[in-house]
Amino acid sequence: MGTMLQEFKAFALKGNLVELAVAFILGLAFSAVVTSLVNDIVMPIIGAIVSDQSFANLTFEIAGVDILYGNFLTAVLYFLIVAWVLFLLVKAINQMQRPAAEAPADNMRECPYCLSAIPRLARRCPNCTSEIAPGTA
């Protein structure tokens, strides 16, 4: 019984699982904020412009059945806001994780034509195929 509890503790406290739990909880909180933004601020403004009622209450009737297109458009706007914020977040994270350009090593030099790093003794640049005198530039 003790080893099973130790295994469960090791599993539950692994970094990936804890990070996933934190991300899930933050996602729920973010979802609540975006839902409030869309339902309580954006859609009432749009509803005031479009009609005198709440945007979510906009409907039309087909064969006695109400089609709640206001609710659908609210959900679409909610999705677009979440997708845009996630796009910006992923873009920022990718930019932060991009490795810094490394300085050329002692056995490397810069091509005078395309400015890429090439071996010091190269006679032709492998990138732009320009002929270069060895050991120069």
Image (tube, grey):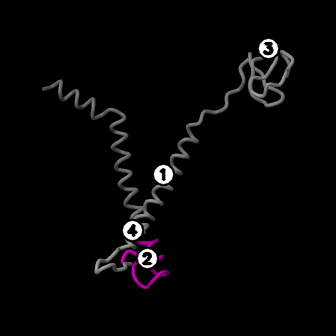
- Crowding at mark 3 (Cα within 10 Å: few <14, some 14-19, many 20+): some
Q: For numbered disc 1, what is the local secondary structure?
A: helix
Q: Earlier in the sequence, mark 3 or mark 2?
A: 2
The part of the image, by quadrant, that contains residue 40 is bottom left
- Contact (Cβ within 8 Å) of mark 1 with mark 2: no
* Mark sitting on residue 121: 3
Residue drawn 78% across and 28% down? 128
Q: Please determine whether, in this image, residue 94 is positioned above or below residue 61.
A: above
Residue drawn 31% across and 77% down? 66
* Mark sitting on residue 72: 4
On the rendered structure, is 37 left or right of 7? Answer: right
Q: Earlier in the sequence, mark 4 or mark 3?
A: 4
Q: Earlier in the sequence, mark 4 or mark 2?
A: 2
Q: Which residues are magenta?
A: 40-57
- Distance from disc 4 to disc 2, alpha carbons, whole Å, reads 15 Å
* Mark sitting on residue 44: 2
Give the residue type at disc 2. Answer: Pro
Q: Nearer the viewer, mark 4 or mark 2?
A: 4
Q: Earlier in the sequence, mark 3 or mark 1?
A: 1
Within the magenta stretch, is there residue 89? no
* Mark sitting on residue 86: 1
Give the residue type at disc 3. Answer: Leu
- Distance from disc 4 to disc 1, alpha carbons, whole Å, reads 21 Å
